[in-house]
Image (cartoon, helix red, strand yellow):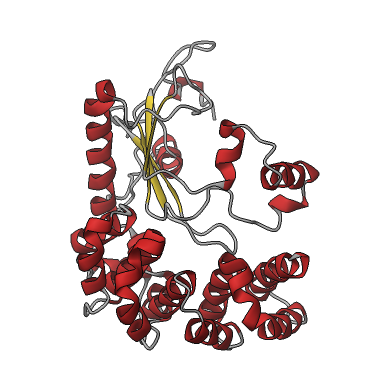
Amino acid sequence: QDFRPLAPRDKGTRLARLVSFVDLAPTALSLAGYEVPRHMQGEAFLGSASEVPRTYTFGYRDRMDARHDMSRSVFDGRYKYIRNYHPHREQGQHLQYMYRSPTTRAWDRLYREGGLEDVHARFFEPKPLEELSDVASDPHELRNLAAEPDMADVLERLRSAQRAWMLEVRDAGLAPEPWLRQEALRSSEASVMRGMPVDELLAAAELASLRDPAQLRKLTEMLLHESVSIRYWGAVGLLALGPQSGPAIDSLRQALDDPALSVRVTAAEALAKLGRSERAIEVLAELVESDGYEGALMAAIALDELDELARPAIEAMRREAARKRKIKGINSTFISNVLDKALADLDAG
């Protein structure tokens, strides 16, 4: 079959339009002459079902192998906006495969030695709440324009578009992974999210990521909410506040007994970083040696983030790392990789 007539332009010409990865499947159906199902998020950009060019493309970052994160982006062809919902985590979280590269290891060493300039050091430091780049003049996205007064209109437009998209797709990242995986066993993640108050969850995530001490009372109250997801974001917000969450110590202690894994682990990490580590480290040590994958992985990550504060759990970490190395499977590998890295840091210390 001759597919040349399906081309939107003559050979050698260039078609400039925004295309997202989710557009590929409907485009393939369109080219083959099939009807594109309405439930598909993507939009055909070739063939009989080709649609009006997109105004925006959207992107996301969630779990990266063993490490948890949450960022969302929107791009209009010139400006890219990124909202970081875990700004307390560094951009370059430790991924085992990434650190197999000698370049990454040298980069990391130079950062620890203080031998990097600002632009090169950012990868290993906490993220800003919002990022805005003019990709036309700054293709490597090195200059953050989010605080520039003359970019306020662009910032608000893209911020609103990103927020509307999360609500439209009922973003599953707003629910903590262990809880969502468990709930989805009875149906699917999409079905679970259809029954969730996504607008409330997004508001909770936005509040938690502000790192604003003025929101301390609201974040503390969120720890008592009936929704696991909102309790989780309350704990994330208090963790992100760091030392400024001190007045919430008693509430965080109570959260160590929360029925939700994600809340217990996040509260334990926050407490340990506040210097109230004894019971918090006990909780993390118990979870890291538990049979449950989600709890063990989250606890391992928290212990790694605690650095020297995690030393009382070192024997539990060693036992579990050795046990997981003997078990085949990607889940066990994720946990052992995180624990091996944490143990190496403690041994070096």
Q: Would you say 202 lies left or right of 128 here? A: left
Q: Which is nearer the eye, 179 or 101?
A: 101
Q: Which is nearer the eye, 274 or 235?
A: 274
Residue 175 in view in this figure:
no
Residue 176 image-quadrant placement: bottom left
Residue at 54 percent across and 70 percent down: it is 302
Residue at 60 percent across and 75 percent down: it is 310
Q: Quadrant of the N terminus?
A: top right
Q: Quadrant of the C terminus?
A: bottom right
Q: Would you say 116 lies left or right of 262 here? A: right
Q: Is residue 53 above or below residue 259?
A: above
Q: Is residue 246 above or below residue 98?
A: below
Q: Which is nearer the eye, 25 or 91?
A: 91
Residue at 59 percent across and 64 percent down: it is 66
Residue 315 image-quadrant placement: bottom right
Residue 156 in view in this figure:
yes
Residue 291: x %, y % from top left: 58, 88
Please tell me how many numbered marks the rendered image carries.
Answer: 0
Residue 245: x %, y % from top left: 34, 66
In the picture as drawn, the residue positioned furthest to the right comes out as 102
Q: Is residue 244 above or below residue 272?
A: above
Residue 216 image-quadrant placement: bottom left
Q: Which is nearer the eye, 295 or 252?
A: 252
Residue 257: x %, y % from top left: 38, 88
Residue 262: x %, y % from top left: 42, 75
